[in-house]
């Protein structure tokens, strides 16, 4: 079973970077999930997809996978986008090319 090693992005509801410094090791899904005909729940017979381990470094996660003989892929994190700081006063600047309206 193929594993994936990645660093999770920050959640959309938080402005901080908490719980984003660890590398996550988890198994990829081999078979798609199916819908139970009786209750309509989504289920899967794969129990390895429930395993999710965290490592402090990428090297530690790679070392674990190689020691256990698990094939893996590494998903590198994207750098965060630079945010442009904008102030309310820029709406009334003389350097503005287009007039500001509501």
Image (cartoon, helix red, strand yellow):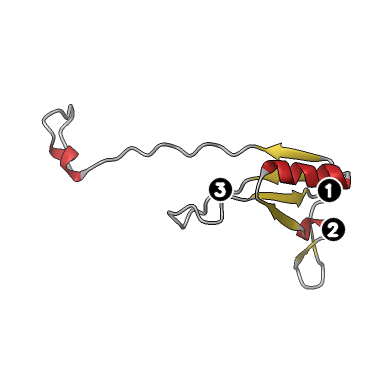
Measure the C-alpha gap from mark 1 to mark 2. Answer: 8 Å
Measure the C-alpha gap from mark 3 to mark 1. Answer: 24 Å
**Looking at the image, is 16 positioned above or below residue 84?**
below
- SS type, badge 1: loop
Q: Which residue is mark 2?
A: 46
Q: Nearer the viewer, residue 98 or 93?
A: 93
7 sits left or right of 44 in the view: left
Q: Position of residue 99 (x, y in %)?
A: 15, 33
Q: Nearer the viewer, mark 3 or mark 2?
A: 3
- SS type, badge 3: loop
Q: Position of residue 84 (x, y in %)?
A: 33, 37
User: Quick one: label 1 or label 2, which is nearer the N terminus?
Assistant: 1
User: Quick one: label 3 or label 2, which is nearer the N terminus?
Assistant: 3
User: Quick one: label 3 or label 1, which is nearer the N terminus?
Assistant: 3
Residue at point 59% right, 39% down? 77
Q: Does the rendering let one see residue 21?
A: yes
In the drawing, what numbered circle is on residue 30? 1
Q: Position of residue 66 (x, y in %)?
A: 84, 42
20 sits left or right of 37 in the view: left
Measure the C-alpha gap from mark 3 to mark 2. Answer: 25 Å
Q: Which residue is mark 3?
A: 9
Marks 1/2 in contact by CB < 8 Å: the verdict is: yes
């Amino acid at each position: 079973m193929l594993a994936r090693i990645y660093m999770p992005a920050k959640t959309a509801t938080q402005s901080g970077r908490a719980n984003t410094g660890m590398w996550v090791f988890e198994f990829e899904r081999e078979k798609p999930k199916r819908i139970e005909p009786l209750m309509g729940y989504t289920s899967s017979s794969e129990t390895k997809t429930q395993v999710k381990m965290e490592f402090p470094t990428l090297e530690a996660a790679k070392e674990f996978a190689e020691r256990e003989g698990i094939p893996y892929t590494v998903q590198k994190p994207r750098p965060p986008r630079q945010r442009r700081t904008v102030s309310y006063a820029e709406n009334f600047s003389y350097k503005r090319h287009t007039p500001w309206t509501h």
